[in-house]
Image: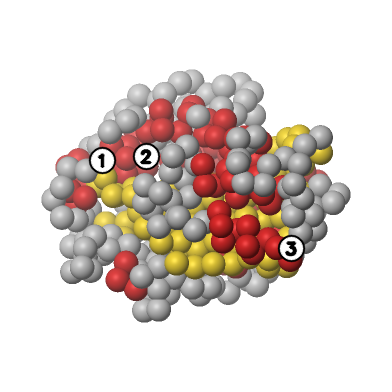
Amino acid sequence: MEDYKDKYKNHKAKYLRLINNDDAQLGGKNNKYNVDNFDNKMNELIEKIDSNYGLLITANNKIIYEKYVGRPKVTLCQEGNNSKTRFRIFSCSKPVTAMAIIILAQMKKIKLTDTIDKFCINVPHNDVITINHLLYHTSGVYDFSSELYFKLNPKKLFDKILGEYETKFVDFETHVQEINKNEPYFTPLKKSHDFDFKNYNNTGYDILGYIIYCASGMKTDEFIRKNIFNKLNMKNSGFQHEKHENESIPYENNKKQAIKEQQNWFCGNAYIVCTLRDYNKYLSNYEKLLEPKYLEMYKKLYFFGKINKNNKDYNYFVHRGAGDFRRQHSIGKEEYYPLSRTTAMKFFNEDKNVNVIVSENYPTNNGFFAHGQKNWNLIIENIMDMKL
């Protein structure tokens, strides 16, 4: 199994390929499509994709394409995937966690320059690590969350928290204890904004989730529900530690042995479960949650950027989420099970405002993100060439 840091270090380059790919064969740079024939082009693009998934595309706040494929035997949803399916979006939760942090700053409950010792988080360099370090993945803190789920190290600890086929909660004190058993990856950088994906750190966002609790006096999930979900009318969004009849949980085999890794209420790196339409509401309306000064802070975070495509400048917002589970803890096999693959992307300028969200709850070797993300690249290329 590759080291999880290697797994993530090329993410930013991949993100740029998502929206700057010039190798797409269908359509090409010089062809312009309109909404009327977009369905035909999309159907042609995804014809051979054999994964279970949901795909939602909106342009200027209107749905222009939506498709769901999924057999009931691999989801909790009795009808298979549909617009009510709550997908497990894993790291696509991070922009929402970051939004909650910026909201707390707007409420004057925290400053992004606060060091984490203020919140009694007793890990190495806690008097140097700031909230900004955590937001930009530059804290250097030992990434216990990734070690647990990618390398399953320490294995004995994982065995202790295992239920029949669900992992039980790992409380925050356990996180801190395990962090302190290991050396930090590096001394925190003086410039907290020097973001580099090679330092991608899930535990940093779990610590942010805990800070939301400390600063607000509310459990993290409750704070997000009140201040983000409710305000954006995201009625079909929740969290992994909750149970919901429409939640998508893959199964290992025909015996319907479920795989559900329970994330804690503070697990800011990967805890949200929602419909694609609800995540689209977030992408379309997050600006309404913040005053201009704080919106500017949010838009400086690592999942925003700018790119030129076909001599046009675009702003973009993009994040991926991936969940894997070691089958040893479900059916005894020493291998990993691809639990979920999600990408949420927004690109916009004065002429175009497009959201593309896809979530696979049964990834395959011919899914959206297989073969160097070829299928995904084709989709993005065609959307950016489309006239609206």
At x 52%, y 24%, the residue is: 188
**Residue under the image location 26 percent in, 40 percent down:** 152
113 versus 59 height, above or below: above
Residue 147 rendering spot, x and y as whole percentages = 32, 37
Mark 1 nearby-residue class (10 Å; few <14, some 14–19, many ≥20): some
| Relative depth, front residue between 162 and 85 | 85
Front residue of 160 and 25: 25
The residue that mark 2 highlights is 146
Disc 3 element: helix
Real-space Cα distance between discs 3 and 2? 41 Å
Mark 1 / mark 3, whichever is N-terminal: 3
What residue would you read off at disc 1? 152
Q: Which is more N-terminal, label 1 or label 2? A: 2
Q: Is residue 59 left or right of residue 162?
A: right
Question: Is residue 285 at all visible to an observer of this figure?
Answer: no
Q: Is residue 62 left or right of residue 142?
A: right
Three-letter amino acid code at the position of disc 2: Ser
Q: Which mark is residue 355?
A: none
Q: Is residue 140 above or below residue 58?
A: above
Secondary-structure class at tag 1:
loop
Mark yes or no: residue 37 visible.
yes
Q: In this figure, which residue is indicated by the disc labeled 3?
A: 35
Q: CA distance from mark 1 to mark 3?
A: 46 Å
